[in-house]
Image (cartoon, rainbow, N blue to C red):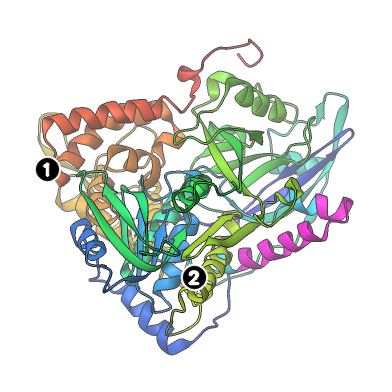
Amino acid sequence: MSATRIRRLGAAIAAAAGGTAILLSAPSLSGNDRGSSLSLDAIRRQINDSNGVVPSRAVQESSLIGAHSGNPLDLLVIGGGATGSGVALDAATRGLRVGLVEREDFSSGTSSRSTKLIHGGVRYLEKAVFNLDYGQLKLVFHALEERSILLDGLENVRFGRRTAPLHLSRYYSTQEAAELFPTLARKGKDRSLRGTVVYYDGQMNDSRLNVGLACTAALAGAVVLNHAEVVSLIKEEAGERIIGARIRNKLSGKEFDTYAKVVVNAAGPFCDAVRKMADKNVQPIICPSSGVHIILPDYYSPEGMGLIVPKTKDGRVIFMLPWLGRTVAGTTDSNTSITLLPEPHEDEIQFILDAISDYLNIKVRRTDVLSAWSGIRPLAMDPSAKNTESISRDHVVCEDYPGLVTITGGKWTTYRSMAEDAVNAAIKSGKLSPSNGCLTHNLRLIGGDGWEPSHFTVLAQQYVRMKRTYGGKVVPGVMDTATAKHLSHAYGTLAEKVATIAQNEGLGKRLAHGYPFLEAEVAYCARYEYCESAVDFIARRSRLAFLDTDAAGRALPRIIEILAKEHNWDKSRRKQEFQKSKEFLETFKSSKNAQFHDGKHN
């Protein structure tokens, strides 16, 4: 259902006098089977049933309401980001009764605003080696182990085929580097290129991976509901244990209680707000950090090859990577306040442009910024620690109020093991009885089973895009290679369902010039991926808001028109959707949304 294209990226360190840079490229995936086969096979059949669809939103809400005090869930998860969705999938595949609620949309927060890498951690490795920091080294090895699981195509990728493992790193001469990366500067400020070292890493479409996790969890038996906010926690009469939550459906305004033996707090940057619902005097454990990224045209980096500046003038790491036909560059690392819609500051955007311009032979312009966004990293501090030195990129699992297990910190690469740790803690807290152990190291997401890299050719050969003209006439169009590849990578084996809608319902037209997103995807996501608003689609189901803010704005009227038909919206709701979407897009600082120009990158 939801897609993620996880690719292998090779990164090269361009060793230059007075500075260092790094590059990136792309082969395929491999893996080994493990786990308990009988229960695993049954779960796989359930997830990959060609006739299976996720339960409707009404059914999911009804199931949560049905979890009363005499029939509680085993787990209620608060938060539908990578960690929360991972917890729901892990627990459901252990045979536990699981519910998940998310205030906004799956991946609406930090999980959709990452650098799009599945990696071991360049920054952590440097600290481990030069500072003799065993904790950082342990974090790197842990991330590498989890990366191997993700890239093996076992749990959460569309790739069902296993091929060669990640390539070994290697050195390239100056001439070879220039051929690999034409825009890499041979000479810069007081430095010259001596050569590059290429290493390989994984890349993903983060929000589609997250939506895939949530939908796979739903097919595995979890009850998942987005746009459902926890307004308070329910305590037992003695007040000594959390036994559920009061939930508000933000689309209807309806409130209801859901009971559970354990509540798992996976609310990311908002974890402390949930913890304060249990105990208003609890000490905070989140140290929020802002990470800004920008999107540039594709010509900034060659296909399959990126650039890493491992140490900028103020010690930060900057990546510049090809992503979905464009180039993503970032990130920053600054103290910030916690807000639902963080915005990038102009000086952070300029910092990224400055950092990459030192290593490129092309003019780096502010007007080239197609989109810019900010995400909040929930850096965690162990609540039992005596000082802030325990702030880490690693994750923390704690239960500082009985019945409320909090999981926070970490990063995308380690979300699976984070979820496993959280479920283990919940089992212990609630004295739960799972039918089996953790299986997620050996489980593919919906749409991943049977996927082949050549799958797009089936779409190109067997389907056409029926497009409605401005006069209302429906005419056939070619299912071109770019569109077929996009659908295959975004939806896996389920891409044929999208292609069928494009062909049979006259929804084969592209939503925005220069991008492969089809009208049919809006209808498909509304029916099968819990897409409940225009922002859900432009930000998380497609990535148009992140790729090109202005193009997303131009596509809004048609997207809202299709969603209105799918969800029976009235005129007032359509107007509301348009206004909310425009406000959302204003937080993405494209060149047209820039607050000011300082003249440096004109």
Indicate left or right for 174 with 471 as reference: right
Q: Is residue 600 above or below residue 582?
A: above
Indicate left or right for 92 with 322 as reference: left
Indicate left or right for 594 with 64 as reference: right
* Viewer-proximal residue among 549 and 392: 392
For mark 2, give the secondary structure: helix
Q: Earlier in the sequence, mark 1 or mark 2?
A: 2
Q: Is residue 533 above or below residue 431?
A: above
Residues in magenta? Answer: 127-148
The type of residue carrying mark 2 is Ala
Q: Is residue 489 above or below residue 327?
A: below
Residue denoted by label 2: 426
The answer to whether the residue labelled 1 contacts the one labelled 2, judged by CB atoms less than 8 Å apart, is no
The residue sitting at the top extreme is: 599
Rendered-image quadrant of the N terminus: bottom left
Magenta stretch, main secondary structure, is: helix
The type of residue carrying mark 1 is Asn
The residue sitting at the bottom extreme is: 38
Residue denoted by label 1: 568
Examine the structure image and report whether residue 287 is included in the region drawn in magenta. Answer: no
Q: Is residue 158 visible to us here? A: no
Indicate left or right for 512 with 185 as reference: left
Examine the structure image and report whether residue 133 is included in the region drawn in magenta. Answer: yes
Labelled disc at residue 472: none
Q: Is residue 406 visible to us here? A: yes
